[in-house]
Amino acid sequence: MMLSILILLFTILPALELYVLIKVGTVIGALNTIAIIIITGILGAFLARLQGFLVLRKIQENVAQGILPSSELLDAALILIGGLLLLTPGFITDVFGFCLLLAPMRLIIKFFLKKRLEGMMKEGQAVHFTWHQSSQNNIKYKDIDIS
């Protein structure tokens, strides 16, 4: 499964991006196509930064209240991926990147990711890390559960 995802990411997706860029370039012109790519890159970087700061502030609030910010950390990872996709030239990656920067879309994606991760943990395909703290000298250690 992982191999097929890598093949998709590094061969099929760039070929599709190139095809779409050529088709769009023939309709609106090469300079307009390049301008759109540059504008989406700049806009994507701005939106990723803005969303990233909002999520960072929420993480800090949760940590200050003693709440583990698991959902916010997943948001941060999705925003990072979205920002990287928007910096990648192409229209297909831009669509996916903008989707990851929109909070309602991230909510839907997080729902399916959490379901998938829960299924993987039940099947023993994911590793679950927990931290324990000893009452003696505040010693912390990691426990890895691969069952």
Image (tube, helix red, strand yellow):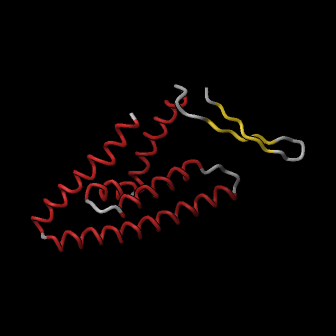
The N terminus, quarter of image: top left
Q: Quadrant of residue 36?
A: bottom left
Q: Residue furthest right?
A: 136
Q: Position of residue 74 (x, y in %)?
A: 52, 50
Q: Residue furthest left?
A: 27
Q: Position of residue 106 (x, y in %)?
A: 42, 51
Q: Quadrant of residue 89?
A: bottom left
Q: Position of residue 84 (x, y in %)?
A: 40, 60
Seen from the viewer's position, the closer of residues 15 and 59 is 15
Is residue 120 toward the left or the right of residue 28 in the image? right
Q: Position of residue 54 (x, y in %)?
A: 52, 64
Is residue 14 toward the left or the right of residue 144 in the image? left
The structure residue drawn at horizontal position 87% and vertical position 41%, both measured from the top left corner, is: 135
> In this picture, is 35 found above or below 139?
below
The structure residue drawn at horizontal position 10% and vertical position 64%, both measured from the top left corner, is: 26
> In this picture, is 99 found above or below 34?
above
Q: Quadrant of residue 59?
A: bottom right
> In this picture, is 56 found above or below 69?
below
Seen from the viewer's position, the closer of residues 10 and 136 is 10
The C terminus, quarter of image: top right
